[in-house]
Image (cartoon, rainbow, N blue to C red):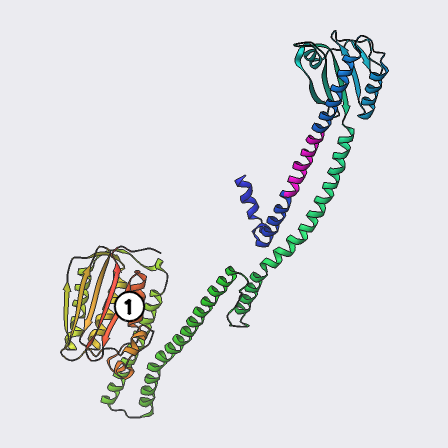
Amino acid sequence: MGGLWKKIKKWKCFRSLSVRIFLLIMFSCAIPCVILHYGILERYMDNAINVRTTDVQTQVRIIADHLTTYNYLLDNSSEVVNAELSQLSNLYDGRVLIVNSSLRIIKDTYGISEGKTIISEEIIKCVNGGGASNRVRDNRYIEIVVPIEEKLDDSSSTLGVMLTSVSMESIISSYEYLKNRALLIEILVIVIMFGIAVLLSRYILRPFDKITDAINEVKNGFTDEEISVTEYLETERIGDAFNQMLGRMKVLDDSRQEFVSNVSHELKTPLASMKVLADSLLAQSDVPAEIYREFMGDITEEIDRENKIITDLLSLVKMTRTAADINIETVDINSLIELMMKRLGPIAARANVKLIYESRRQVNAEVDEVKLTLALSNLVENGIKYNTDGGWVKVVLDADHQFFTVEVSDSGIGIPQESIEHIYERFYRVDKSHSRQIGGTGLGLAITRSAILMHRGTITVESQEGKGTAFTVKIPLTYIAS
């Protein structure tokens, strides 16, 4: 049965909600029809047979008493009794047999079996004191067996049996009539319910069609307006979810356009500088060697800057890919940070900035060593670049039973409060003129944030202008796969 249902569900039509609603309504209609057909009609048949049997038994018992009164078993010439037997036979379109204790038929209303002996289990039981009985024979007749008893002082004696066969033709005719009427009603109800089911299934799903049309309008680019379908709570929720997704798509599209614009600007700026420098050299016939070397040095710096932007863009693209690109392994975080601080030592020395590393416990975690090193290096390098002469950058490593934290703080120039929420945006710079002097592409913090999010971690920042900045990175010790 389960396999059959799976095959049915694979049919495309049965995957339609409108078809399922239609079938549900039709089944709801079919159940009362089945109850009507097999309940009421069959109940009518049983009740009609019981009523007919009871009526006939009552009349038979009365006639059986008359048989005893008129000694009919000894002399069957009584006109009164014969009239009653004929009347009973004609009334119910049946046949009456009067059988004595010797199982000999002394009266047959059909007049064909008188004087014959009848062998019947019901009659023998009744003669032997088994009492009255009845049964339906061949679904055409009701056979009723009633003893003919003589009342004595303290008991009774069975003198014979009265066997009455009553036709069920009138009951069957009434049953067939009702059955045909019920069938007509069932067909009429099914036709009406079919129409109602079609209309209801379409009406109920009309709000979903509105949602589909609205989504297609947005997909085809004809509109970017939010949709509102409040007929049902479910459609309202779907509409709200779609509107939120649409809003998110608008934000992403705006971000994409801004990103493309920024990339174009950032890539064109070094090229424009190189072109100006090259045109200046070409415009002069006799360029002194000192000026030539100076211009070529500037061109080399612009090429390095262009290369740095492209490298950071590639790193950012890798960071925004799926988690399938992350290479997780168990890493000694203490050693990772020590090596990172050692590599950044010369940069800090040239900027006259002191590097401080504090490890509060030994930490081993499941991370991508390359991506995490890049993320933390960007934080420390930013702390060095945007610091003051003689300042410091401090890195503190700590952990609990679930996460490890890395705090990177500095004594630098700080970040204005209105800029903190934008620092992770690509190409965003707090002070563009100062950032241009010290280098950088404006992608470092975007790369850092992406790398930390790939590890299912978080990054927070606190800063005050003129006092410094503190970034706190929190990452699970055990990598949590999506």
Query: The residue tagged with tag 1: helix, strand or loop?
Result: helix
Image coordinates of residue 246 in percent, x first then y, are 47, 68
Residue at image point 61% right, 49% down: 23
Which image quarter: residue 254?
bottom left
Q: Where is residue 15 in the image (x, y as percent from the top left)?
A: 56, 51
Asked whether 33 falls inside the magenta stretch, the response is: yes
Residue 210 appears left or right of 451: right
In the image, what residue occupies the spot 59% across and 61% down?
A: 206
Residue shown at 79% from the left, 18% from the top: 96
Nearer to the camera, 261 or 129: 129
* Furthest-front residue in this view: 153
Q: Quadrant of the C terminus?
A: bottom left
Give residue 295's position: percent from left, percent from top: 27, 86
- The residue to which callout 1 is attached is 448
Q: How many labels were placed on the picture?
A: 1
Q: In the displayed structure, does residue 290 sit left or right of residue 92?
A: left
Instruction: Tell me if residue 2 is in the magenta stretch.
Output: no
- Image quadrant occupied by the N terminus: top right
Q: Give the range drawn in magenta.
A: 32-48
Q: Name the residue nearer the viewer: 85 or 224.
A: 85
> Residue 352 lies in what quarter of the image?
bottom left
Q: What residue is rendered at 24% in x and 80% in y?
A: 438
Q: Say what amino acid the circle numbered 1 marks.
A: Thr
Q: Is residue 381 left or right of residue 177?
A: left
Question: Would you identify the image quadrant in which residue 229 lies?
Answer: bottom right
Q: Which residue lies furthest to the top in this view?
A: 102
In the displayed structure, 455 sits above or below 137; it is below
**In-front residue for pair 124/326:** 124
Query: Can you say whether 5 is above or below 208 in the image?
Result: above
- Our reading of the magenta stretch's main secondary structure is helix
* Above or below, comparing residue 461 to residue 73 in the picture: below
How dense is the environment of label 1, judged by Cα within 10 Å: few (below 14), some, or many (20 and up)? many
